[in-house]
Image: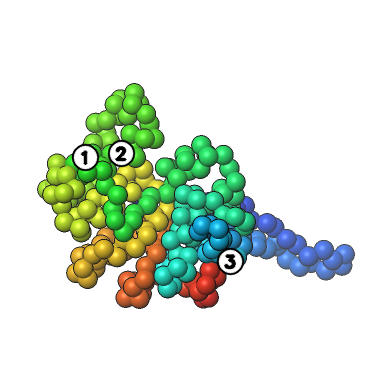
Amino acid sequence: MNQLLNLVSDRSAHVHRAAHPHADFGPAIEEPAPCVPLLSASGVVKSYRKGRHEVPVLSGVDFSIAAGEFTAIVGQSGSGKSTLLHLLGTLDAPDSGEIHFEGKRIDNVPTSTRDKLRNEQFGMIFQFYHLLPELSALENVLVPRMIAEGVVRYWYNRRRHLQQAAQLLEMVGLGHRLRHKPRELSGGEMQRAAIARALISRPRVLLADEPTGNLDRKTGDEIMRILRSLNADQNLTIVMVTHDPAIAAQADRTVRLVEGRVEAA
């Protein structure tokens, strides 16, 4: 599989020379370019209505992740972990605050722009896989390309997409299960298919919501080996929500949410 895109392009360096009328301070010194996070949240607030009551979920979250980083978001049930992940992936919009991708605000752009960004730049995997039951593993992996390209363009590129999808399934250990439907796959195999589906568009960021939460320990460890390999070998940026400290410990960094706020990063 072709490697995923690498780090955010550096900004041009700013050259500074001290101004002094009588002294020579030597050659100009190049200052390091500022580091722009690949994905970030600033002052994000989010609430949901439950009947007549408004339930606060996030209360001013500041979060950022650099390109190529693997970050785990942890916290108790109801702390806002999945909500934050969905906001980062533009599946929902914050009540206030901002979400930025490559330094550009993305939470307030038109819906069509968010959809395009989500389909091209973000890959997503979930605890319950969300595979379409009537499609084979191979066909499930192809779904994002079908949606992104439309019928005519997809059929024109179909052979190339089929080859790429088969390669992805081979990469995650499902090369022998291409034609099997979800009901014929184990939980771990369904999650592998979901990972392949998330990668078909060659995303910059993989957002994983409890990717091992519905699996036994051995199978969960196998899924984590795949995610760590994608991060290490292909420099894929990963943001993962988990309630399991042992799973979180396998990430580069852990961010803890407590009562809707970041406690430590």
Per the image, the residue denoted by label 1 is 135
Q: Amino acid at mark 2?
A: Val
Instruction: Name the residue furthest right.
Output: 21
Per the image, the residue denoted by label 3 is 59
Q: Front-most of 171 and 109?
A: 109
Q: Are marks 2 and 1 in contact (CB under 8 Å)?
A: yes
Circle 3 sits in a helix, a strand or a loop, which is it? Answer: strand
Per the image, the residue denoted by label 2 is 143
Q: Position of residue 26 (x, y in %)?
A: 73, 66
Q: Front-most of 226 and 30?
A: 226
Instruction: Name the residue furthest front.
Output: 52
Q: Is residue 246 above or below residue 233?
A: below
Label 2 vs label 3, nearer the camera: 3
Q: Residue at x 26, y 47 (%)?
A: 131
Q: Position of residue 60 (x, y in %)?
A: 60, 65
Q: Residue at x 87, y 67 (%)?
A: 22
Circle 1 sits in a helix, a strand or a loop, which is it? Answer: loop
